[in-house]
Amino acid sequence: MLNMYIDTCVETKEINADLIKIAKKLGYVTLAIEGLTKYKEVEGIKLIPRKTYTNLEIPQGIRGHIKVLEIRNIDYLKRKTNIIKRANSIELGYAVLKRLTDKQVRIFQVTKVPVELRIYDIIEVARKGGQLNGLFKLLRYAELGKVEIVLCSGAKDAYELIPPKSIINFMLELGLSEVTVLKALLNVPKHVIRGAGFDT
Amino acid sequence: LIPELLLVVAAVSLILALSAIYIAFIAIRRCRLLYKALTSKSIKKYIKTVHEKRSKSSKKRYMVFEIIASACNIKKEVIEEAIKAEFKELFGNLEMAKANISVLFFDQKTCRGVIRFRSASRPKVLATLGLVNELNGVKVVINPLRVTGTLNKAFKYMKK
């Protein structure tokens, strides 16, 4: 298996041997870990710090980690597009995944910031019986090449990492094309990491 | 006599030229018709249906998988149950019945095993495997390695 994949949203609290072993076996080369303070490289796997900002508060000029903006309420988007541009990627909350209008998706298109989609979040919304209208709208725009998406697991534990093959097939089942899925797994995460000042 | 002969030759050549033009015209027309037929909707539909039929064919596929865990003392029945439960939750009872999933073999030494399923539900099975996180209370990751058409090939890959 080629080791070339990137997971941009790992939320594990401790970096242990299990995480490295599993990531290596699954074919990951880079993991962006929430709460990590410094860049590390362990047994060939790059661990990049990542920080999630809520309520549209991203300070200017800060480097050294991937800046992710969590959007819980979509109404914020209208006014503060300049703040959105400071983020490396945007993370969408449950409420946003459920409902998203064309106008709101176009904001992502204008700002050109990639939208992060977590597989576990999608599954959880589906498990709770929620509709994924917002997600499908976003996927349609991604398929047309208007919005960039980043696919990641959202693992809270080393054993929650998802094999890239499973992510690809899961997204194929949701109606995305193979090209778009591979782009969202390989190319766009690379751009996000480079945008944060790290080499992939 | 010579002008009469020349007249005949001219008439014959004219007839030949006209017939050649006619044949060329018909040939071009036929080529155009053939090109249109090849790009027509009906042909495209036919190709699509053939593809769909192939994709819906009930051929068996065998997948070699690897379990990443602290200990691999897991029975194959437990793995099968966990995969089926996850599949059922994601895609429902009908899809599970169609997929016909069964774990044929699991080697506890190498932590590798073989799953059999219908080829039409390959992406669904692959998507499900990655989402199974627990087997008998033990945290695991199931890593799909390779899909093969025959059991022998699957066993060969398993031993590699």
Image (spheres, coloured by chain):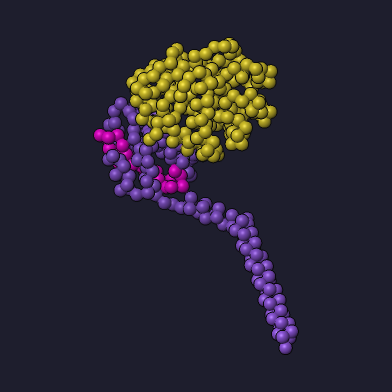
Q: Please report the residue visible at 72 percent of the width from the left and 85 percent of the height from the top.
A: B2
Tell me residue A142's x, y (percent). Answer: 59, 33
Number of marks in picture: 0
| One can see residue B136 in this view | no
Q: Please report the residue visible at 70 percent of the width from the left and 73 percent of the height from the top.
A: B18
Q: Is residue A181 left or right of residue B110?
A: right
Q: Is residue B111 magenta?
A: yes
Q: Please report the residue visible at 65 percent of the width from the left and 19 percent of the height from the top.
A: A81
Tell me residue B23's x, y (percent). Answer: 65, 71
Q: Which chain is purple?
A: B
Who is closer to the viewer here, B155 or A146? Answer: A146
Q: Which residues are magenta?
A: B98-122
Q: Is residue B155 left or right of residue A65?
A: left
| One can see residue B84 in this view | yes
Q: Colour of chain A?
A: yellow
Q: Is residue A44 magenta?
A: no
Q: In the picture shown, does residue A171 fall above or below A90? A: below
Tell me residue A42's x, y (percent). Answer: 36, 20
Q: Please report the residue visible at 66 percent of the width from the left and 65 percent of the height from the top.
A: B29
Q: Residue furthest front?
A: B2
Q: Give the quadrant of the N terminus of chain A.
A: top left
Q: Residue furthest left?
A: B109
Tell me residue A169's x, y (percent). Answer: 47, 38
Q: Quadrant of residue A78?
A: top right
Q: Is residue B34 left or right of residue B54?
A: right
